Amino acid sequence: MLAASFFALAAHAANIVVDTGHTPLRPGATAASGKVEYLYNLQFTNVLAGELVTQGEKVFRVAADGKEITLQERAIREPAADFFVSIHHDSIQQEWIDAGRRREFAGFSIFVSEKNPHYAQSLHCAREIAEQLLAIGEVLSLYHATLIPGENRPLIDRRLGIHRFDDLVVLKTATIPAVLIEAGVIANPDEEERFAKAETVQRLAHAIATGIRVCQKP
């Protein structure tokens, strides 16, 4: 029975590209403590890749080796893949940080691009991932829908925190369904402290991996 279950799982395995947002030379946002986003992204994708493998998927890593890579190269490196997920951690506008508003923003947000050739499937997967995150008690951030320059991203699903960002390069150039996830707002010292804990990362990574697995089902 165990052998039969294993082969059934293997037969339905998906090929997932796990993209670690940014690089050591272009590290992204800065957390409240000064730690750079890339390090949080790398920690998270290490755990997420392990969760996906545990759930029976095949994983291709991008930008986990510390080497420089262009945005265009990230999404098209593995033509045999079924799904692309890019992991990031958020900041907020510098003027809001300077105004002492760091603790006003927390939670995850998910992005899809209508320019992706598999937009409908991308949105389906975004919804499945968001449902899993909400199910474990995570909250969503609507910061990117704020009506200010540099944000104002169309909010496709307010309940699930899914935004449309059509010109995100890694999403629009991907030839497979693709989503980008901002796991949390590390500019917020409370969020940063939470994401420094291995158990937090493990919980979120498990939820995201489960959402990806569910959305790959026919």
Image: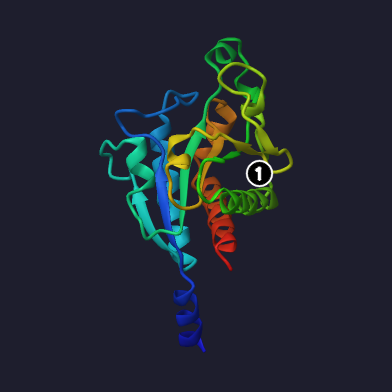
Label 1 crowd (10 A; few <14 / some 14-19 / many >=20)? some
Q: Quadrant of the C terminus?
A: bottom right
Up/down of 99 relative to 206, above or below: above
Q: Quadrant of residue 69?
A: top left
Please state if 187 lies on the left or on the right of 139 as rendered. left
Up/down of 101 relative to 3, above or below: above
Instruction: Name the spot of residue 85 as percent of width and height, x first.
Output: 47, 48
Q: Quadrant of residue 37?
A: top left
How many callouts does the rendering have? 1
Kind of residue indicated by mark 1: Glu
The colour scheme applied to this rendered structure is: rainbow
| Residue toward you, 126 or 92 | 126
Residue for point 58% across, 54% down: 121
Instruction: Name the spot of residue 104 as percent of width and height, x first.
Output: 66, 23
Please state if 139 lies on the left or on the right of 206 as rendered. right
Instruction: Name the spot of residue 68 as percent of width and height, x first.
Output: 27, 36
Identify the residue at the far right of this view: 159
| Residue toward you, 163 or 58 | 163
Q: Kindly identify which residue carries mark 1.
A: 138
Residue for point 33% across, 34% down: 23
